[in-house]
Image (cartoon, helix red, strand yellow):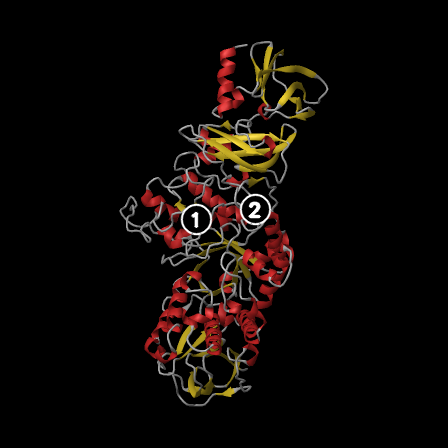
Amino acid sequence: MDVPFEKENAGLILQGLHRNPFGYLGLHQMGDKTLMARVFLPGCEQVELWSSDRKKAHANLVCFDPEGFFLAEMEGSARFPYVLKVVRYGRESWLEDPYRFGTVLAERDLADMTEGAHWSLYGVLGAHLCRLEGVDGVSFAIWAPQAQAVSVVGDFNSWDARVHLMRSRFRGGIWELFLPGLQVGDPYMYAIREADGTLGPWRTDPIAFQVERHPRKASVIYAQNPSQSKTYLASRQSHEWRREALSIYECSLAAWRKRELEHGPMGEEESNQALIQHVQDMGFSHIQLVESTAWADASADPAQAHFFAPVTTQPRQLQRFLQACHDRGLGVLCDSALSQFEHFPGGLGQLDGTHLYEHQDARQGHHPSLAERRFFNISRHEVLNFLVSSGLYWIKRFGFDGLCVPGLARLLYLDFRRTDWVPNHLGGNIHLHALELLRFLNELAKGEDPSVLSIAGGDAVWPGATRPTYQGGLGFSFQMNDSWFRDVLSYFRKDPIYRRYHHNELIKTQLYAHNEHYILPFGLRSQLQGPDILGLFPGSESQQLAQLRALLTWMWCFPGKKWMAMGTEWAFLADEEQVSLDHSRSKRADFVGLKKLIAGLNRLYRSQAALHEPDTDPNHFTWVQTQNQDWSVYAYLRRAQSGAFLLVVAHFTPVVRPGLRVGVPVPGSYQVIFSSDEPRFGGQTQYPQSLVSQAISADGFSDSICLDVPAHACLVLELKP
């Protein structure tokens, strides 16, 4: 036995610095007819090496070091499968030695990861249940190219970073290890010797599929189980959402649960079912979960802490929620924040002691107003690969129907809210690598299944965001029209007596309504001054509610798909980190009417092709009345491809306007099919069965109708056959 050699290697193991533990531990050929067995098992009193079928004892290992090193020489001309019989604390058991197994990752996978072109990293990195050489266990793999050594720690080794040192595959900076016998639900973390040899904080797996919540944030072994049924996929693929009534309800499962608990004790499953029923009752086509992967954040720039693990619920429970939604015909979308990540000890920041995922230059990697965040170095192809794989994971493996990428402006523009910034290699302010990231993500997400939705979020003005990538666009299905919400709020915040001076603020929103495939949002927290939506409007509470009903009706009739934040139906927005949704309002008749209004709008939206077919065609929208600023009255036509049309008339002052004359393109009998001032919605006005047009010219038409318009109301009229 070479004592100096043994002591040197044992010392490196004890320090957690051995870069090649497989070259020392396990069973090794020492000569033509000699084998050497070495194991490191702290706390063991006796170790024997047996054949893998446990029928033959080959060697009794001798304790070489009191820290737990055992070794033995034996006769043999070739390595063979074996198992260890150990006595620890007086108890006998059998152990598989992880250092007897071969490599886990295929060379093809390593090559693709090195090139930054492995779009399913979630299938190779992280922790995966597997069977290696006939033994069940878990394979671990992590990217840490500058690390001196990496260990897996957990309850299974008493969180001892010396016990399970990983194998360096060198190519691509990947570390791997197969640990036999581990189970679903076992917590684990990585202990990483950083580039300078220091042991950093234990790290959460960057590709963890389940993570403990505060404070430890340990990764948890999880068995991936794709949940989408072929029946549901076929149903999803039958939709062409750019030509259909897409309406999205954005919500936080945690905030919803908190509200439901105010009713009394309720389990998570029951709470989720109540949410699904609530959304269905209001007629939405999709739910968007804001905290499926991100920490709940009401800011305009959400950041994620984990990119493959849900945060506010367990992955299996989230999959059950998705399945329940799909069974009821509801699609589900999730947020995917790509520009930055939440920085905390044990997170992605300086994972291997170097700026691995983030920029080294503080002008690119930090922001003075966002101290707890770091910005991804997307110019590094491995990082771009990581982010694309994250988005694809939620769609392909988890079962989401699409992604929303929030904070797009911060991702696309290098100088966004920065005074000190670094231009691209062309000298401009466009993040060219971010364009590459978004195009890759959209192409790959929708390449196999065009029914997958991708939504560009945030107030980024980017021409062609919803054009195909082969036409120079970014490839998104839709873009959130934050500018519309901001312009509309600017108008409605003004006292009605002064709105006549700002009449064009609503008219100008139509000028850009057809530039992209837009989604109109209501309830963006970044543009609100507090959770109480009624505070946006002047006047008494009844007047505020009337204005909210009129605005929502205006929105549902305006070109663009629909998006509404949870709580709008109670005129109160909140999340679980702030205050719960105002439970008292949900019982009041006027707020029950508000919820009925939203349900009615979604029914109208689905049933009337004129409201959802031609969103991007300006020929299907015609202003009828834009000059009545003294009364704050607007009127326009929405046309379907069949030629059918609806007349929308809106009035935004607190007095009734009797005898309003509005031009119509076709003479005949018109019926008010929807009014925001109906008694069932909390209003006061009933309309006659029909309004017959008269041969009196108005608004450029030879015929017109005369109607009394309620205070703060929006009406929808249809030509009766």
What amino acid is at disc 2?
Arg
- Furthest toward the left, the residue is 427
SS for callout 1: loop
Question: Which one is closest to the eye, mark 2 or mark 1?
Answer: 1
Q: Residue at x 42, y 73 (%)?
A: 537
Which residue does the numbered mark 2 point to in the structure image?
397
Q: Position of residue 27 (x, y in %)?
A: 59, 18
Front-lying residue, 437 or 592: 592
Query: What residue does disc 1 label?
Result: 338
Distance between mark 2 and mark 1 Cα atoms? 19 Å
Choose the circle earlier in sequence order: 2 or 1: 1
* Residue 498 location, quadrant: bottom left
Q: Pick the residue in front: 504 or 621.
A: 504
- Location of residue 276 in the rendering, given as x and y in whole percent from the top left corner: 60, 61
- Is residue 451 at least partly visible in the picture? no
Quadrant containing the C terminus is bottom right
- Residue 402 visible in the snapshot: yes
Residue type at tag 1: Leu
At which x and y percent is residue 477?
Answer: 46, 57
Does residue 559 appear left or right of residue 273 in this picture?
A: left
Mark 2 closeness class: few <14, some 14–19, many ≥20 residues within 10 Å: some
Q: Quadrant of the N terminus?
A: top right
Q: Which label is found at residue 116?
A: none
